Image: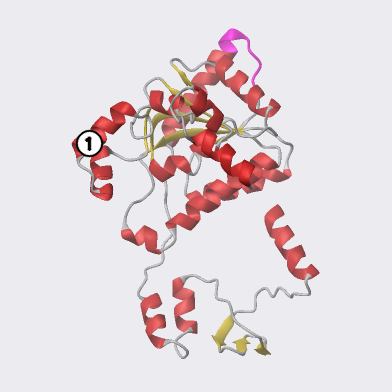
Amino acid sequence: MRLVDALCASIDARGGELRLGDAVTSISPTQIASRSGDHDVNGVVLATPAHVTGPLLDVLAPEVASTLRSIPYASVVMTLLSYDDALVVIARLVAVARARGEPLRSPIVLVGGTALAMAGHILHVLDGAPRPFVFLVDTSGQALRRHEELIGLNAYLAHLACTVDVARRSGFPSVSIVYGEAVSGGYLSLGLMANRAYALGNAQIRVMDLHAMARVTRLPHDQLQQLARESPVFAPGADNYVKMGALSAIWAEPTAALMSDALAEVMRESSRADGRLAAGHERGGRVLGEPTASAVARAL
């Protein structure tokens, strides 16, 4: 609720007025009609879903209204984790910790849902005491249909990524662990936004299958295979993500001690700058990224 409260305070400070429960029934360039009556305005900005915007534009722009009405409205579902598998991983870590007599910490474990729902969970806990998030990741990626693109999939993913960043800046750092599969935007918008990312030994990580990449880039598949052998940027596999600096490490066998150390580390370094670009340069996986970013920074 912090973001909502800050936005409301900003509107109020600028002399604005926020009306709740006053549905708009029609609009014109200089006037809007709502349940409470007619209101003169200097301009109108519509920030409503297609199925709401369409009827409001019936008179002003009937063709646009017709197009908007034809867009089906649905929530964007991006299942990032298998709930049952996530619980098994958590239970295993707890059991190992208890068997070794190690103290149990109390991180916030996010086990899945839609992008919007997960963003809501992240923002909801920011009113509490600072503590780390743990993202357990097993995702085949975001929905790839044109329908999802039309209803704003990119905005939902961007919102989720922003909430992870807001949490980090508010003293809630995060650790992500890939225990199955991690593909494309489903991983980029959450797992790779964490302060530190890890993978188990059997994890499969890739941004895009080489066959799909060939169709998009129009490069021959054989050429992409050769590039993947030469550069980690093109190649799938957790090892290549370590080389690029995206992963801090691969855990051959997950233990409570590894988890405890990772949580303690992100709490200590939560205010530090992201070091993945430098790590990728040191490990030889992204040799041009850090020098290029430094050159741009010096030129500003």
Identify the residue shown where x is 65% and y is 39%.
168
- The front one of 151 and 245 is 245
- The disc labelled 1 sits on which kind of residue? Gln
- Report if residue 79 is visible in the image: no
Identify the residue shown where x is 43% and y is 38%.
81
- Is 99 covered by the magenta stretch? yes
Residue 120 pos. (x, y %):
58, 50
Residue 157 pos. (x, y %):
48, 51
- The front one of 112 and 264 is 264
- Is 191 covered by the magenta stretch? no
Above-or-below relation of 147 to 67: above
The residue that mark 1 highlights is: 223
- The front one of 267 and 92 is 267
Residue 212 pos. (x, y %):
26, 44
Identify the residue shown where x is 59% and y is 8%.
100
- On screen, residue 134 versus residue 17, left or right, reads left
Question: From which residue to which does the magenta span run?
Answer: 98-104
Q: Quadrant of residue 20?
A: bottom right
| Residue that protrudes farthest toward the top in the picture | 100
